[in-house]
Structure formats: C-alpha cells, structure tokens
Amino acid sequence: MKIASVLVVDDEKNIRVTVRESLRPLGFEVDTAINGEEAIEMAGRQSYELILLDLKMPGMDGMDVFRQFRLRWPDTAIVLVTAHGSVDAAVEAMKLGAVDFVQKPFAPQEIRDVVTRVLQRRDDRKNPKTSNSIGQRRNP
C-alpha cells in the first residue's frame, strides 16, 4: 500500500501549516507550495492524488493553476480553498472538474473530513470491491 500524497497550495503560511499538521496524523504525505508556479513545478516531479488549492494568490491565481492541472494531470483530484468572496469562482471551477471546495476560515476537522471523503470516493471508484483504510492507497 502507498500513502496518499496531497499538495497544499496557498500563499498564507498559517493555512499551509494548519492543513499539513491536520492531515499528517491520518497518514497522508503532505507537501506545500507557496504559489501556483511552485505547485506546477512540484507536480512535474512527483504525482499527487489530491491538490488543495487556494483560489486567490498573487501571481498565477488559483483558477489558472486549476486549468494547468486539468490539462497536465487530469486524474488529480482538486479541492478548492476559497474565501467568502470567491465562492462563485469555486462553483465555476467545480463545473470544470474540481471535486469539492472548502470555505475559509475552516476547522482542521473539516479539512480532514473533505480529504478523507474525496480520496475514499476515488478509491471506491477504482476498486469497487475493496475499501482501504483512511490515508492508505492501494497500488494498482
């Protein structure tokens, strides 16, 4: 079994740290990127099962990053992290293939629940007759 890998992309350090520290105890491998450019570079070197992506960042904004991921890594699940003012953008991204969104501010348990649910759904689709423990991924 392989540990599920998650990439957190947010320009706010406290968000990156909170998400990383919320997911690691569940067995997830968590990397962080400070902006979209760094996220794309990291994804070119390592595959991720899930991206937690902030919509509002300096430089390349979250929607641009989202579009790049859909083109380059279409099988990667993307959950958008958004502030109240960008819920419309999150809804638009979900129409384009994002799997979920989380609104800031959020509780650590909310992130754990969303990530676990998204990855479990993904596993269930890949392996309909088997289920995996939280944080664990089956090798195909």
Image (tube, rainbow, N blue to C red):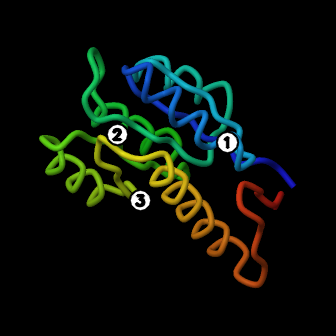
- Asked where in the image residue 80 lies, by quadrant, the reply is top left
Label 1: state its secondary structure.
Answer: strand
Amino acid, disc 2:
Arg
Crowding near the residue tagged with mark 3, few <14, some 14–19, many ≥20 C-alpha atoms within 10 Å? some
Amino acid, disc 1:
Ser
Q: Does residue 23 lie above or below 99 as drawn?
A: above
Please tell me whether mark 2 or mark 1 is closer to you in this view: 1
Marks 2 and 1, the one that precedes in the sequence: 1
Q: Is residue 77 left or right of residue 1?
A: left
Q: Position of residue 123 (x, y in %)?
A: 67, 67
Q: Position of residue 88 (x, y in %)?
A: 14, 51
Q: Which mark is residue 60?
A: none
Residue that badge 1 annotates: 5
Task: Find the distance from the CA under tag 2 to the CA under tag 1.
Answer: 20 Å
Q: Which mark is residue 67?
A: 2
Q: Residue at 12% of width from left, 41% of height from top?
A: 85
Tally of marks: 3
Q: Residue at 22% of width from left, 39% of height from top?
A: 83
Q: Residue at 40% of width from left, 23% of height from top?
A: 36
Q: Does residue 124 lie above or below 45 as drawn?
A: below
Q: Residue at 44% of width from left, 19% of height from top?
A: 13
Residue that badge 3 annotates: 99
Label 3: state its secondary structure.
Answer: loop
Q: Residue furthest right?
A: 1
- Locate the N terminus by quadrant: bottom right
